[in-house]
Amino acid sequence: MRAFITVLLLIFSFQSWTKADDISDFEIEGMSLRSSALKYFSKEEIIKNKIDDYKSKKYSTSSIKSSKYEVYSEVQISYKTNDSKYIIVDINGIVTRDYKACLNEIKSIALNFDKMFPTTTKRNLKTFSHPIDKTGDTKISDIFWQFTNGDLILVACYNWNSDFGKKNYFDDELRITIGTKEFDDFLINDAY
């Protein structure tokens, strides 16, 4: 029952998306791509919550938890490292979710996203190893919808039930991501 309620909350939080013409119109916890993170967080908060996972320093990501979020328990924002305006190029809304339950949940979310984004290119569910875990034991399963300009919306399940995940005290999670093509290319080619 709890998973069903969460699916409804996630879908409800995306209802305004059906009328959006551009990915910048979409929001996670009121935040949208290409806006300044300084509209939502102080510079100190962004810097204090910066995570250092990338081998390339072109981009940075800050992971911020807040009880003020309506749907998610944590939001990750990414921006160019030397950008004094902290323009958001990627946003992740994150909730803790058992991996197997998450896989069922993203299938339900995908059915609704298919209706919301009928003109995008969809990549069906794919599972792969997380590049940060060199053992290959940490898995990500995701589905994404890519817009004509290359920007994308992604739904993913992270399986942190690995030695790497346990060592870092990571919980399995469900993520909804809004990202620019530029940042996606960075993740694929340069980040790890």
Image (cartoon, helix red, strand yellow):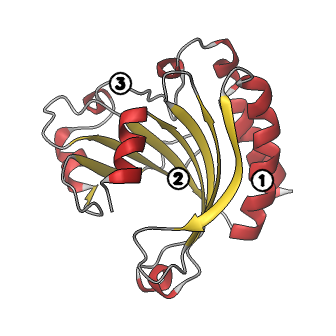
Which residue corresponds to mark 1? 105
Which residue corresponds to mark 2? 73
Which dot, 1 or 2, sits closer to the camera?
Answer: 1
The structure residue drawn at horizontal position 64% and vertical position 53%, both measured from the top left corner, is: 142
Residue 52 in view of the camera: yes
Q: How far is mark 1 from mark 3, CA to CA?
A: 29 Å
Considering depth in this image, is 105 or 131 the residue closer to the camera?
131
Quadrant location of the C terminus in the rendered image? bottom left
Label 1: which secondary element? helix
The structure residue drawn at horizontal position 49% and vertical position 68%, both measured from the top left corner, is: 130
Image-quadrant location for residue 79: top left
Which residue corresponds to mark 3? 34
Q: Say whether disc 3 or disc 2 marks the residue closer to the N-terminus.
A: 3
Residue 148 sits above or below residue 53 on the image: above
Question: Mark 3 belongs to which amino acid?
Answer: Arg
The structure residue drawn at horizontal position 52% and vertical position 28%, both measured from the top left corner, is: 27
Question: Mark 2 belongs to which amino acid?
Answer: Ser
